Image: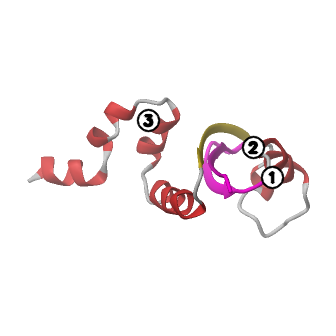
Amino acid sequence: MEATVYILRCADGSYYTGLTKQDIEGRIWEHNNLPLEKSYTFKRRPVELVFTETYDRLLDAMAREKQIKGWSRRKKEELIALNYEGLPAVSRRAHLIGAM
């Protein structure tokens, strides 16, 4: 069963990271149209899809979603830009080591 990890850019400029087993276009439609007042994206509409990764195993997708959610805004932006080589340089750990 495939699962997709995705990042949305919200109208306020923030990012939302999620995971879905459904069609990604349908999931984005839900973020923009369903009346889920308590959801993060409800008051930040419209949202725009800026990144996806698809996994064959749900557990792999869940682990990746959790990893990305822990990242800084800058690191997420490097991922969105597909700058994989730049990810280590913007990690929090790299900044802490560089400060020592």
- How crowded pointer 3 is (Cα within 10 Å; few <14, some 14-19, many 20+) is rated as some
SS assignment at label 1: helix
- Circle 3: residue type: Glu
- How packed is label 2: few (under 14 Cα within 10 Å), some, or many (20 or more)? many
Residue 5 picture location, percent across and down: 61, 50
N-terminal-most mark, 3 or 2: 2
Q: Looking at this view, is 54 or 39 the one in front?
A: 54
Residue position marked by numbered label 3 in the rendering: 78
Contact flag, marks 1 and 2 (Cβ < 8 Å): yes
Q: Which of marks 3 and 1 precedes in the sequence?
A: 1
Return the residue at label 2.
47
> In the displayed image of the protein, which residue is found farthest to the left?
100
Coordinates of residue 68 in the picture (x, y in percent): 48, 54
Find the magenta span and give its range. Answer: 1-22
Q: Give, as a three-letter code, the residue at label 1.
A: His
Say which of 89 and 59 sits in front.
Answer: 59
**Left or right: residue 97 compared with residue 64:** left
Q: Position of residue 34 (x, y in %)?
A: 90, 57
Query: What is the spatial separation of the Cα atoms under label 1 and label 3, in whole angstroms?
Result: 24 Å
Specify whether 87 is left or right of 32. Answer: left
